[in-house]
């Protein structure tokens, strides 16, 4: 397992598995490169490195932080809001891992992410809509830095982005259950019965 953060802040580039890793920032691309370097030369019949987008699932830190901010009226765009978010629903993550395990033709780097990345402003607008929250003011970049310090996280996680696509998964025939963000978030917010 690895992360699409290996591409750093890729701007407007459409990033598939052939895209080179970024030189930085060290806490994102640097850590991911070290993870992937650690597995080089592993004794295995087949080695697959899953570079994963943000997995959306209830009860996970990524989704719960976004949902909590939205509930408290802080669900506006973050920074400029134009940064790309590569995401996927937990069902698609689980199904992709099973699919790759059984697809002997897949080796090397495989992106595990929705085929439809979105900009941060769309992610936040979708959360507000699905959670029935009104418009929220944007969070300016300096405030993101303060909030990241308070939450003990890295502001680059919110202020940078990657427009990654799962080219190799799709070419191998994988079908996503939740390829669109609106439907994926709706599915996560459906109340579960005991």
Image (spheres, rainbow, N blue to C red):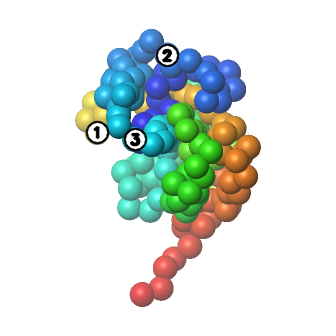
Q: Quadrant of residue 109?
A: top right
Secondary structure under badge 3? Answer: loop
Closer to us: 185 or 130: 185
Q: Give percent across and percent down for residue 53.
A: 52, 41
Q: Residue at x 40, y 41 (%)?
A: 44
- As drawn, the residue found furthest toward the top would be 23
Residue holding disc 1: 151
**Is residue 96 visible to the viewer in this orientation of the structure?**
no
Above or below: residue 125 compared with residue 190: above
State which tag comes first along the sequence, 1 or 3.
Answer: 3
Residue 170 lies left or right of residue 60; in this view the side is right
Quadrant of image for the C terminus: bottom left
Dot 2: element: loop
Q: Locate the N terminus by quadrant.
A: top left
- Graded by Cα atoms within 10 Å as few (under 14), some (14 to 19) or many (20 or more), the crowding at tag 1 reads few
Q: Earlier in the sequence, mark 2 or mark 1?
A: 2
Residue matched to label 2 = 22
- Residue 16: x, y in percent? 65, 30
Q: Tag 1, which secondary structure?
A: loop
Front disc: 2 or 3: 3
Mark toward the viewer: 2 or 1: 2
Write the residue at 35% across / 34% down: 42
- Check disc 2: other Cα within 10 Å, few if <14, some if 14-19, many if 20+: some
Q: Which residue is mark 3?
A: 44
Marks 1 and 3 sit apart, C-alpha to C-alpha, by 39 Å
Q: Quadrant of residue 157?
A: top left
Closer to the chain start, of discs 2 and 3, is: 2
In the rendering, at what x and y percent does residue 95 appear? 56, 60
Determine which quarter of the picture holds residue 82. Answer: top right
């Amino acid at each position: 397992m690895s992360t699409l953060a290996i591409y750093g802040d890729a701007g407007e580039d459409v990033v598939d598995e052939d895209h080179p890793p970024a030189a930085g920032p060290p806490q994102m691309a640097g850590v991911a490169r070290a993870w992937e370097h650690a597995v080089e030369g592993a004794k295995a019949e087949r080695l697959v490195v899953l570079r994963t987008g943000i997995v959306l699932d209830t009860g996970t830190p990524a989704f719960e932080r976004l949902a909590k901010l939205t509930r408290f009226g802080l669900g506006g765009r973050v920074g400029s809001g134009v940064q790309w978010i590569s995401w996927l629903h937990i069902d698609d993550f689980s199904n992709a891992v099973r699919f790759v395990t059984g697809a002997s033709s897949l080796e090397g780097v495989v992106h595990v992410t929705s085929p439809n990345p979105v900009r941060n402003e769309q992610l936040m607008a979708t959360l507000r809509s699905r959670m029935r929250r009104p418009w929220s003011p944007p969070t300016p970049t300096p405030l993101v830095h303060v909030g990241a310090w308070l939450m003990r996280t890295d502001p680059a996680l919110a202020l940078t982005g990657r427009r990654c696509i799962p080219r190799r998964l799709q070419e191998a025939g994988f079908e996503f259950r939740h390829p669109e963000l609106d439907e994926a978030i709706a599915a996560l917010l459906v109340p579960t019965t005991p």
